Amino acid sequence: MYEIVGIGSDSYIRIEMPSMVTVSAAMELYRQMAEVPEYRDGMPAIWDMRHSNIGELSAEEIKELSAYRDDPPIREGALVATVVSSEGERMIAKLINSSFESAIDQTRRVFRSLEEAEAWIRSERNAASGDR
């Protein structure tokens, strides 16, 4: 599920992962992001994985997901927050994020609540615009 939250330059895309995460499903969600009418390249994203099974991914699946690269959508320079529900999932998300950060110019963080992720995006935007 995709949802654009906010208005104009203050908006971000929230992607809610299904309960059963597979590598192919995650890749398809990533590709479909560019098809959301209000989406724009570089828009901050929050990947909500609180209700998914990310903690059950195998080492091979984590490696495959971490290696995934595709052209659309353009995510260079984007802020990307991942929200998880447990410490184990947090460690897996950080592992995946570190691979993406090294391959794509993005700033990525992992949080335990949607509110923390939203606050981080606002804070980063304010810092970038000098409003801090």
Image (tube, rainbow, N blue to C red):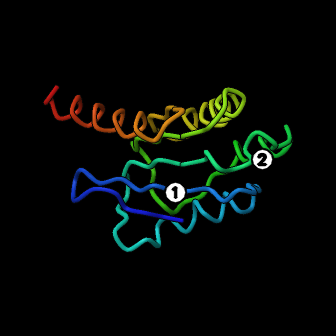
Instruction: Relative to 42, say whether 127 is above or below.
Output: above
Residue 64: mark in rendering: 2
The residue depicted at 40 percent of the width and 41 percent of the height is 79
Label 2 crowd (10 A; few <14 / some 14-19 / many >=20): few
Please name which of the two marks, 1 or 2, marks the residue nearer to the observer: 1
**Residue at the image point whose x is 46% and y is 38% from the top:** 106
Q: Amino acid at mark 2?
A: Glu
Q: Secondary structure at mark 1?
A: strand
Splitting the image into 4 quarters, where does residue 131 fall?
top left
In the rendered view of the protein, which quadrant contains the C terminus? top left
Q: Is residue 116 left or right of residue 48?
A: left
The residue sitting at 26% across, 37% down in the picture is: 125
Front residue of 69/34: it is 34
**Which residue does the numbered mark 1 point to in the structure image?**
15
Which labelled disc corresponds to residue 126? none
Between 74 and 132, which is closer to the camera in this rendering?
132
